[in-house]
Image (tube, rainbow, N blue to C red):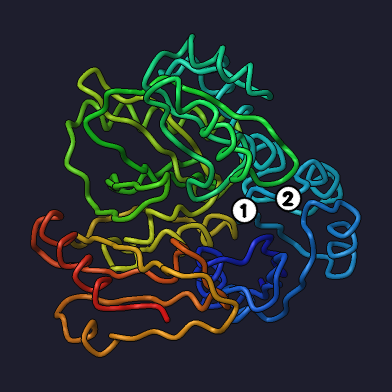
């Protein structure tokens, strides 16, 4: 059955989701706050609104009367989702999940307090003075993040008391929406980080993708690889935590659940109720379904019997260096395309700014993930944004 889907947020992840949905015969309206966003370029229709304006959001829902609402970003008036759900519109993964996961405070409290998952020590702050108190409790070094942000914006590490004021200002600048609050958490001495892509299905069966390792700078991912080698006992622990928290929130779809892996085991970090940026490595054909195909199938209620690792893979981001309102031009594509067993995806973002993610380079094969990361970085280094 063909369903009408409203996608709220139309970045590069949304673009791949739209493509996956269209390949399954669905109709998609892409929504964002600016025109010509990546997902709008492949959707059937698009709308440009401020998604924090509840009345504007209501008007779009009333106009299109969708069967499904799929959020792709945090800055949305998500409390309206409960009303839409009550009217029979399917919210992905659910109205409760969207509301809880769009705000780090709600999801962290569910994980740490209600479910008792292992997390870093943390405190919240709505003022600079509260942040100073939180730093005293969490100790140095510690990490500060806006409660509502995306792609690591506003995130920083406080190494000394001299960094507190700068961290507060940076967090406020990177905060999205109208939530001006931060979380400060103790620094976990981890061996590596993983994203555990978790799929909840209509039939009640939860599936897990092979773990994805990643490296960050400025709070944003730079490279990711699949699979991340890890001890089976720690992977099992992370899977059990991911299943607990996703079942608590309810609904169907793909979730990006992040963990710190230490010698003692897994620490729950964050959760996104949608495809994850580090999961773009699955576009290299590492699995029988990419994360976007998994999300589309799960939200449409199509059963997914299993997720299988087909080959190793790695991704490396292609970043802009300068700010420009002009349509970006890419150089070096021929050189990048000459490297065997690699690929690249350009997102089609209409403008540039420093460190904005404009594309992703991919590498795949039988080599180790370390070797594939080097190859993916070589591809991304060939491509420049002008």
Image quadrant of residue 103? top right
Q: Which mark is residue 356?
A: none
Q: Are marks 1 and 2 in contact (CB under 8 Å)?
A: yes
Please give the name of the residue rendered at 25% of the width and 24% of the height, measured from the top-left corner: 262
Q: Residue furthest top?
A: 137
Assess disc 2: are there few (<14), some (14-19) or many (≥20) residues with their C-alpha within 10 Å of its C-alpha.
many
- Mark 2 secondary-structure assignment: loop
Q: Which residue is mark 2?
A: 76
Asked if 61 appears above or below 189 in the picture, the reply is below
Residue 382 percent across, percent down from the top left: 24, 78
Asked if 166 appears above or below 341 in the picture, the reply is above
Residue 366 percent across, percent down from the top left: 9, 63
Give the spatial CA distance, label 1 vs label 2.
Answer: 7 Å
Say if residue 99 shows up in the picture.
Answer: yes
Asked if 106 appears above or below 60 in the picture, the reply is above
In front: 141, or 344? Answer: 141
Q: Which residue is mark 1?
A: 73
Q: Residue furthest bottom?
A: 334
Please give the name of the residue rendered at 17% of the width and 31% of the height, measured from the top-left corner: 231
Rendered-image quadrant of the N terminus:
bottom right
Rendered-image quadrant of the C terminus:
bottom left
Count of residue discs = 2
Residue 124 percent across, percent down from the top left: 60, 21
Please give the name of the residue rendered at 27% of the width and 23% of the height, measured from the top-left corner: 189
Residue 335 percent across, percent down from the top left: 21, 86
Q: Is residue 202 left or right of residue 265?
A: right
- Mark 1 secondary-structure assignment: loop
């Amino acid at each position: 059955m063909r369903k009408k889907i409203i996608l709220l947020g139309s970045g590069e992840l949304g673009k791949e989701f739209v493509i996956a949905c269209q390949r399954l015969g669905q109709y998609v309206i892409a929504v964002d706050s600016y025109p010509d966003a990546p997902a709008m370029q492949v959707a059937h229709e698009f709308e440009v609104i401020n998604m924090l304006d509840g009345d504007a959001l209501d008007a779009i829902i009333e106009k299109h009367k969708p069967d499904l609402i799929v959020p792709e970003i945090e800055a949305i008036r998500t409390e309206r989702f409960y009303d839409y759900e009550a009217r029979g519109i399917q919210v992905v993964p659910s109205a409760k999940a969207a509301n809880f996961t769009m705000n780090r405070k709600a999801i962290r409290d569910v994980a740490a307090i209600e479910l008792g998952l292992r997390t870093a020590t943390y405190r919240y702050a709505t003022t600079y003075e509260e942040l100073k108190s939180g730093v005293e409790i969490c100790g140095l070094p510690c990490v500060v993040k806006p409660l509502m942000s995306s792609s690591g914006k506003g995130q920083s590490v406080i190494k000394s008391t001299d960094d507190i004021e700068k961290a507060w200002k940076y967090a406020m600048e990177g905060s999205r929406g109208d939530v001006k609050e931060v979380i400060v958490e103790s620094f976990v001495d981890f061996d590596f980080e993983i994203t555990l892509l978790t799929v909840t299905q209509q039939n009640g069966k939860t599936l897990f993708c092979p773990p994805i390792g990643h490296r960050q700078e400025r709070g944003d991912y730079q490279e990711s690889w699949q699979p991340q080698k890890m001890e089976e006992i720690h992977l099992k622990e992370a899977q059990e935590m991911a299943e607990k928290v996703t079942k608590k929130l309810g609904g169907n779809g793909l979730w990006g659940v992040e963990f710190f892996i230490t010698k003692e085991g897994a620490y729950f970090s964050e959760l996104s109720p949608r495809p994850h940026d580090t999961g773009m490595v699955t576009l290299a054909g590492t699995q029988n379904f990419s994360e976007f195909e998994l999300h589309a199938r799960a939200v449409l209620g199509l059963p997914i019997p299993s997720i299988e690792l087909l080959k190793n893979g790695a991704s490396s981001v292609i970043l802009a260096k300068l700010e420009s309102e002009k349509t970006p031009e890419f150089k070096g594509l021929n050189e990048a395309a000459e490297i065997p067993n690699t690929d690249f995806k350009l997102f089609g973002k209409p403008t540039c700014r420093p460190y904005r993610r404009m594309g992703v380079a991919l590498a795949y094969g039988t080599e180790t993930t370390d070797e594939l990361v080097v190859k993916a970085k070589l591809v991304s280094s060939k491509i420049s944004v002008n």
